[in-house]
Image (tube, rainbow, N blue to C red):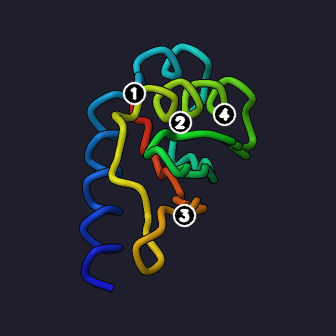
């Protein structure tokens, strides 16, 4: 539980640093925007199978761009064997003018 919380915080921090909110201000997207993302951390620690869902396709694209650039991670383990791990995280943005 502690590891999952730590990982969520680190991924959230990475997304906050890398997500380009500026380009959405001109699109009349304001207020709270939610993007639901899902991805897999494979046996080698690489982020794969990224999916994003939002009310705006460009928000989805930006979320996928950011997640594709996530650094390689330590893969999940079951016993002594590396395993794929599915991960979901909501991205919540507050866009103000």
Q: How many angstroms separate mark 4 from mark 3 (CA)?
A: 27 Å
Q: Pointer 4: residues within 10 angstroms few (<14), some, or many (20+)?
A: some
Could you say which disc has been placed on residue 97 in the image? 1
Circle 2: element type: loop
Q: Is residue 2 left or right of residue 12?
A: left
Q: How many angstroms separate mark 2 from mark 1 (CA)?
A: 7 Å
The residue to which callout 2 is attached is: 30
Asked which quadrant contains residue 60, the reply is top right
Circle 4: element type: helix
Q: How many angstroms separate mark 2 from mark 4 (CA)?
A: 16 Å
Asked which quadrant contains residue 83, the reply is bottom right
Q: Pointer 2: residues within 10 angstroms few (<14), some, or many (20+)?
A: some
Compared to 48, does 41 lie above or below? below
Q: Is residue 14 left or right of residue 82?
A: left
Could you say which disc has been placed on residue 83 in the image? 3
Which residue appears at 73% of the width and 33% of the height? Answer: 56
> The N terminus appears in which quarter of the rendering?
bottom left
Give yes or no for contact between labels 2 and 1 (Cβ–Cβ under 8 Å).
yes
Going from the N terminus, do you reach mark 3 or mark 2 first? 2
Going from the N terminus, do you reach mark 1 or mark 4 first? 4
Going from the N terminus, do you reach mark 2 or mark 4 first? 2
The residue to which callout 4 is attached is: 60
Q: Nearer the viewer, residue 55 or 11?
A: 11
């Amino acid at each position: 539980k502690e590891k999952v919380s730590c990982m969520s915080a680190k991924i959230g921090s990475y997304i906050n640093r890398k997500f380009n909110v500026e380009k959405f201000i001109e699109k009349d997207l304001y207020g709270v925007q939610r993007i639901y993302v899902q991805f897999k951390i494979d046996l080698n620690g690489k982020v794969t199978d990224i999916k994003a869902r939002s009310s705006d396709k460009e928000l989805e694209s930006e979320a996928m761009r950011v997640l594709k650039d996530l650094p390689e991670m330590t893969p999940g383990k079951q016993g002594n064997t590396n395993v794929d791990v599915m991960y979901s995280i909501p991205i919540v943005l507050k866009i103000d003018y």
